[in-house]
Image (spheres, rainbow, N blue to C red):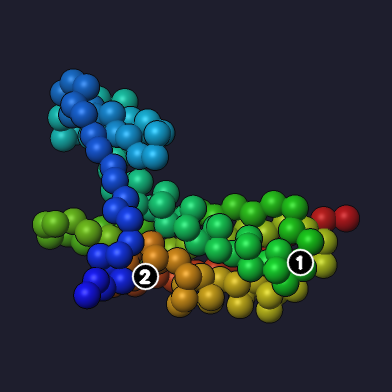
Amino acid sequence: MQTDEESQELERASISLAEGMHFVGEVDGFQIDLDAKEEVGGRGTGADPLHLLLLGLTGCTGMDVISILRKKRQQVSDLTVEVQGSRVDGHPKIYGYIEVLYRVWGKGIDPKAVERSIELSKTRYCPAMAMLGETAQITTRYEIEEEA
């Protein structure tokens, strides 16, 4: 008998060394440059791999929140998600604290709808939030910008 994990199609990603610490990654037909910072032997010609975890978190929760707000018939004209993370001192230097800031623009946006959308993303829908939340304290906040 297959478990839910075994029955799902495998997702894949790969990297190839370009030079030094610079790798070219591929996922779903998209290429992404990855590199280390200069102080650890890289040249800074691509994204730091751990920063991509934060970027994945912004995309995952942002897609959840906009989808839920649209279902709640909120008149959202724009949404941005910013994430800041700090790492622990010891190796491996995982994220110990992450703050997520949602900025919502629109007309007559209901703060309770925004709060509920964020809560649903955090507790039910966003796997990136769930995984990172296993090792990091994640806090969320939001700002609403009313448009005329």
Q: Residues within 10 Å of mark 2 (few under 14, many from 20)?
A: some
Residue annotated with mark 1? 74
Report helix, strand or loop for mark 2. helix
Q: Compute the Cα span from label 2 to label 1.
A: 26 Å
Question: From the viewer's perspective, is 19 left or right of 63?
Answer: left
Residue found 68% across the figure and 75% down from its top: 113
Residue furthest out toward the left: 91
In which image quadrant can residue 15 be found? top left
Residue furthest out toward the front: 1
Tell me whether the residue at label 2 lies in contact with that at label 1, contact meaning CB atoms closer than 8 angstroms.
Answer: no
Residue furthest out toward the right: 148
Indicate the quadrant containing the C terminus: top left, top right, bottom left or bottom right.
Answer: bottom right
- Residue type pointed to by label 1: Gln
Question: From the viewer's perspective, is 35 left or right of 90?
Answer: right
Question: Residue 102: x and y, percent?
Answer: 58, 61
In which image quadrant can residue 17 be found? top left
Residue annotated with mark 2? 130
Question: From the viewer's perspective, is 17 left or right of 28?
Answer: left
Indicate the quadrant containing the N terminus: top left, top right, bottom left or bottom right.
Answer: bottom left
Q: Residues within 10 Å of mark 1 (few under 14, many from 20)?
A: some
Q: Is residue 121 visible?
A: yes
Residue found 68% across the figure and 79% down from its top: 112
Figure label count: 2
Q: Is residue 37 visible?
A: no
Question: Residue 76: x and y, percent?
Answer: 74, 58
Question: Residue 50: x and y, percent?
Answer: 29, 48
Residue found 28% across the figure and 60% down from its top: 95
Residue found 11% across the figure and 57% down from its top: 91
Q: Is residue 46 above or below residue 82?
A: above
